[in-house]
Each structure stands twice: as structure tokens, then as C-alpha cells.
Image (spheres, grey):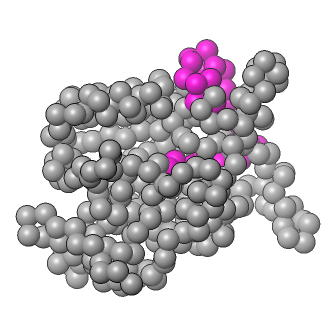
Amino acid sequence: MPEPTIIEHDGIRYRIRVSVGTTASTSPKDMHILNVNDVSNPFMVDTDEFVGHVAFMIKGQDQIWGYEAGQKQDGLKRVPDSKWFENAAKAGRGDNINCLQIVGRFKREWTGDQVVFATVFERPLKLPPFTSVALRFIKAIYTGLQVDVCCPQPYFIGQLLNSTDTVQVTPVSSTLLLNGEYKDKNIPQWPAYQGEILVENTSLVIPPEEIKKRPKLSIDPAARRQHFSKAKNYSKHRYLTDHVYGFELFNPFLDYARFSVKLAGFNIDLFKYFNGQPLTYSIRTQDASVTFLTFVIDLIPVEELATV
């Protein structure tokens, strides 16, 4: 086994902690610590607004100095890299180093323009000189993304159907028990206990006439993102209560384990540019009145593990 990688800033060694919550609050008392890569035990969410399961995967998480101590402190077992990474590579998705998987359903109907995927910081960022280049790259992939990194509370906000790398939509009644009986319609079942990837399929939510004109629209993530980048398309969409949505967000650039970005052969340390802030993702309404899920990726000082 290789020597653990040390993540150190100003003489303090850190490791990563990933948490999930179901409100806008990111206070530790409102969050649940996730065991990264443990896809066989996904975290179940069941609130007034959303029901389903989530899993977070980070490649090389167990190779960071302080991982063992951190897992013990958090009451979690050691988990190696998820087989999702191997399965994704075999499917032609490249060498990804992270993945967020969400499978669930909304408990009331929402329009497509109401539900967004957001990253919002509480304080200004310390921007590196190449920020504009990175933003052009991001916006080329996720067209329609709303971005302001220079304001007092920087943000990245996009329509949910346009912001994720995989969208898989199935009817609730299509999920069966192994013995052939139907599962509880209220609780969508987790399909990835062995690190399975989700397969793009939006045929339930894209009008047949659109698919007829563009046959690959319902199975091509890039085509789906382009389609739902247009207001006339995402505003027509309805998140129905009898549809199960599977979402994946993944890429080969964000190295959460080292809290850095890998670009063009070199690493960019996010610690110095985030101004001491964690990275936060949320699925919420555009007006922020309802939060369905919140994820926090934070650096935890290893020396302080005994007191956190």
C-alpha cells in the first residue's frame, strides 16, 4: 500500500469530511456524516419534500493521511474506492475521480424552472488569475449556468436537469423486489449497491415529438443539457410525484480527497481560494424557500479530530 498523501496548510494537517442534510442549514447538528464510497449502505432521505437515497464517491479518499483516525472518530468503517469508478470507465466515461449519486422522487409537483442545483458561498472568494478561463470551460459544458464569483456571496446556479451529468427517469411502479413483488411506491429503491452506474434515460420527460426529431435526445447527456438549457423547454417540465429521478454528478477535475482541482497536468489548491470555506452543493428551489438536499465537503484538521 502506498504512503498516505499528506494535506497540509499552515502547518496543520487536514482530511475531508462529507455531510448531507435536508435543510438550508449547514450546521453540524443539521447534517449527517456520509461514509464516502459506501454505496452498499446509501443514506436514506425521507422528508416532507423528497424521499430517496444518496451516495458520495471520492477516488483515493482512503489514501489521505488521517483517514483512518477520521473514520474512527466519525464512527465509520474503512471503505475502498467504489466500483463505480471502474464501471464508469468501462462505459466510456473516462477517468473520473468523484461522483454524487441521488435516486429519489419529489413529494409534490414542481415546474422545471423552480428546481435548481446550487453552489453558494457565504463569503467572497480569493480568485486566481485564470478564473475567467475556468469559467468559460465550465459554462461550455453546463450551458445556462448562472454564475457570479465576484459578488459578496459567490454562486453557481443551474436548472437541475441542465446541471447533472446523468439523468435517469423511471416510473415508481417499475421497481420490483427480487421475488417479483412491488416495492413501496413511496420509497424509491437504491439501484447501485455494487457501484452500478446510472444510465441516461429521459424518455419519460421529453415530449415524443422532440425525440422523434432528435432520436438521441433522451439517451445523450450533452443533448439533454442543451435541450434543457432553453427556458422554453425547462419551464414546460414537471417534476411529478410518480417519477423516480436518478441523478449523477461526476468529473475528472475536482479532487475532493486533496481539496484541489486537476487541470492541464497541475493541481490548483482550493483551500487558499475558498477563503476557509467548505464546498457546498444544494438541490433547492430557485427562490431558496425549499431545500431538498444539501451536501458539504469540508476540510477537517486532523489534530482536532478528538474534539470535533
Left or right relative to 90: residue 129: left
As for residue 239 lying within the magenta part, the answer is yes
Q: Is residue 20 above or below residue 238?
A: below
Q: Quadrant of the C terminus?
A: bottom left
Q: Residue furthest top?
A: 232
Q: Is residue 128 above or below residue 262?
A: above
Q: Residue furthest front?
A: 265
Highlighted range, magenta: 224-250
Q: Quadrant of residue 219?
A: top right
Residue at 22%, 68% in the rendered image: 7
Q: Quadrant of residue 238?
A: top right
| Res. 287 in view | no
* Foreground of the two, 151 or 96: 96
The image position of residue 139, as x and y in percent, is: 41, 28
Residue at 22%, 72% in the rendered image: 6
The image position of residue 215, as x and y in percent, is: 78, 27
As for residue 47 lying within the magenta part, the answer is no
The image position of residue 9, as x and y in percent, is: 13, 63
Residue at 39%, 84% in the rendered image: 1
The image position of residue 127, as x and y in percent, is: 18, 37
* Foreground of the two, 12 or 116: 12
**Number of on-image labels:** 0
Left or right relative to 258: residue 37: right
Left or right relative to 18: residue 172: right
Residue at 56%, 42% in the rendered image: 165
| Res. 265 in view | yes
Q: Residue furthest right?
A: 180
